[in-house]
Image (tube, rainbow, N blue to C red):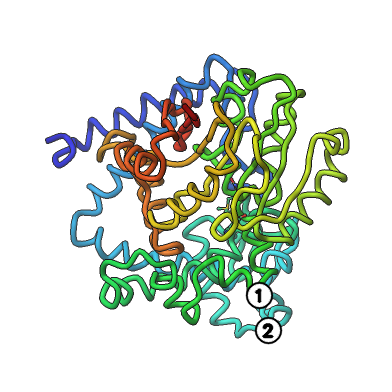
């Protein structure tokens, strides 16, 4: 019943108690105090991975986020809550305008700029600009330090650097992904049971092309998506660090080879490699641009790792695994992108390359029953589930669904462990190929 009838004052108490835990930690560690000011920190201060306080602070912060949302929704009341949902249409459209017209680059890093001058430089009518920016300000993107003048906040500062991963992420969402908002219902109407990537919301929005097919036609978009993924993977609950510390890489044989299937630029393998000096990596992807970018980044930022890395063009849907007999095959954020019939094909293409004892390591969502997570995490996981529906016509899977898939493809592929590292929304699923 607490789900349906939470108490306003109990929620307020939960917020106060847990806020104090987090605030005391920030103060005791001398961490930057959270702020919207332009010189504020990009991220909420949290203990670094594997410090003893991580669990406690993480849980307290989750409690604050979950209880504030509940209190907000409850206090709005059902009628206004629905209205509120419609307003969110403007959340992405205003970000889109800011990104497209490079407003954050025109607004000075320090000080402010008038609407008139900003509108002249961006070539947008001052009234329309004011409409857009004043809505964006309700999300803390910019603020007005004095009437008619715009200045940066810590949030809008994240939109300044066109080389940043956040720039790529916002570009991908506001220019491409959000077009599926208009096609989901149409897709469910037209193709109610389809398991085809060419019959999903993305393909209805983009001339019948499935997501990765579209990227073949627009390699620059594919490259941007690759960069956007690395931004996504540095967010709370999605960090690569959880895979680095959450899997026992040390149990692989000395000098073992790990194939990072659909590894994009290989940024995940790079982090694993740093912590495991004896492992070698082969990064495979169907996007030549991502592989090129990865090679370039490795030589520039981690030249000491180049001897342990190879990059290989590979299409896991249409070709058999070219690296035979590796010790482990990693699929991070890969299989959840595909409806079942494609996953079966991907695994079938993998099996002929496997040696006895090879590990298949998935880092993907394993759905828990409703309300097992905090309300904040629940929303993030459900948003991811909607993302894979909109973009790939796929769905996030429960444990039984993963087990069924593996069993159907190949009984020698034994799904042996599923673990969820603390603070991570992604689980680590390990299967072993047992050829007997
Ligand atoms: C969601 S990204 C995941 C990238 C990376 N593993 C990570 O954790 O961020 C999916 C990747 O699969 C690649 N991909 C898509 N279709 C593919 C195919 N048929 N064969 C190989 N790679 C493919 C994409 O180019 C992209 O890099």
SS of the residue under disc 1? loop
Residue 388 to residue 297: above or below: below
Give residue 309's position: percent from left, percent from top: 78, 39
Give residue 224's position: percent from left, percent from top: 66, 62
The residue furthest front is 436
SS of the residue under disc 2? loop
Q: Is residue 14 left or right of residue 113?
A: left
Give residue 123's position: percent from left, percent from top: 68, 84
Q: Identify the residue at image location x=41%, y=46%.
A: 380
**To which residue does mark 1 refer?**
101
Residue 337 to residue 253: above or below: below
**To which residue does mark 2 refer?**
123
Foreground residue among 412 and 382: 412
Q: Identify the residue at image location x=64%, y=19%.
A: 250
Foreground residue among 416 and 140: 416
Label 2 Cα neighbours within 10 Å, binned few <14 / some 14-19 / many ≥20: few
Q: CA distance from mark 1 to mark 2?
A: 8 Å
Foreground residue among 336 and 328: 328
Marks 1 and 2 close (CB-CB < 8 Å): yes
């Amino acid at each position: 019943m607490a789900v349906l009838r939470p108490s306003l004052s109990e929620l307020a108490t939960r917020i106060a108690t847990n806020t104090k835990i987090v605030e005391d930690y920030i103060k005791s560690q001398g961490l930057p105090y959270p702020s919207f000011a332009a010189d504020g920190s990009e991220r909420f201060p949290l203990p670094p991975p594997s410090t003893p306080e991580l669990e406690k602070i993480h849980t307290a912060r989750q409690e604050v986020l979950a209880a504030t949302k509940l209190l907000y929704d409850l206090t709005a009341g059902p009628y206004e809550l629905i209205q509120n949902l419609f307003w969110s249409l403007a959340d992405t459209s205003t970000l889109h305008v800011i990104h497209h017209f490079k407003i954050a680059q025109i607004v000075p890093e320090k000080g402010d700029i008038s609407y008139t001058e900003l509108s002249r430089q961006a070539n947008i009518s001052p009234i329309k600009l004011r409409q857009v920016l004043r809505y964006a300000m309700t999300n803390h993107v910019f603020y007005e330090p004095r009437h008619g003048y715009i200045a940066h906040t810590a949030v809008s500062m994240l939109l300044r650097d066109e080389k940043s991963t956040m720039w790529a992420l916002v570009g991908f969402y506001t220019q491409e992904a959000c077009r599926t908002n208009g096609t989901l219902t149409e897709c469910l109407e037209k193709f109610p049971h389809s398991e085809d990537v060419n019959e999903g919301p993305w393909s209805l929005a983009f001339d019948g092309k499935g997501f990765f097919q579209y990227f073949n036609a627009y390699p620059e978009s594919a490259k941007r998506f690759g960069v956007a993924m690395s931004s996504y993977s540095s967010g709370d609950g999605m960090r690569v660090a959880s895979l680095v510390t959450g899997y026992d890489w040390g149990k692989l044989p000395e000098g073992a080879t790990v194939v990072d299937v659909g590894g994009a630029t290989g940024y995940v393998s790079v982090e694993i490699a740093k912590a495991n000096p004896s492992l070698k990596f082969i990064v495979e992807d169907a996007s030549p641009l991502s592989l090129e970018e990865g090679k370039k980044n490795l030589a520039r930022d981690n030249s000491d790792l180049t001897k342990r890395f190879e990059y290989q063009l590979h299409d896991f849907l249409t070709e058999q695994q070219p690296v035979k007999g590796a010790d482990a095959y990693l699929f991070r954020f890969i299989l959840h992108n595909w409806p079942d019939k494609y996953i079966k094909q991907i695994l079938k293409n993998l099996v002929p390359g496997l040696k006895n004892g090879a590990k298949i390591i998935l880092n993907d969502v394993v759905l828990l029953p409703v309300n097992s997570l905090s309300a904040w995490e629940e929303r993030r996981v459900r948003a991811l589930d909607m993302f894979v529906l909109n973009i790939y016509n796929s769905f996030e899977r429960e444990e039984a669904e993963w087990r069924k898939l593996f069993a159907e493809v190949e009984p020698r592929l034994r799904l042996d462990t599923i673990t969820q590292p603390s603070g991570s929304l992604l689980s680590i699923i390990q299967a072993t190929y047992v050829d007997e």
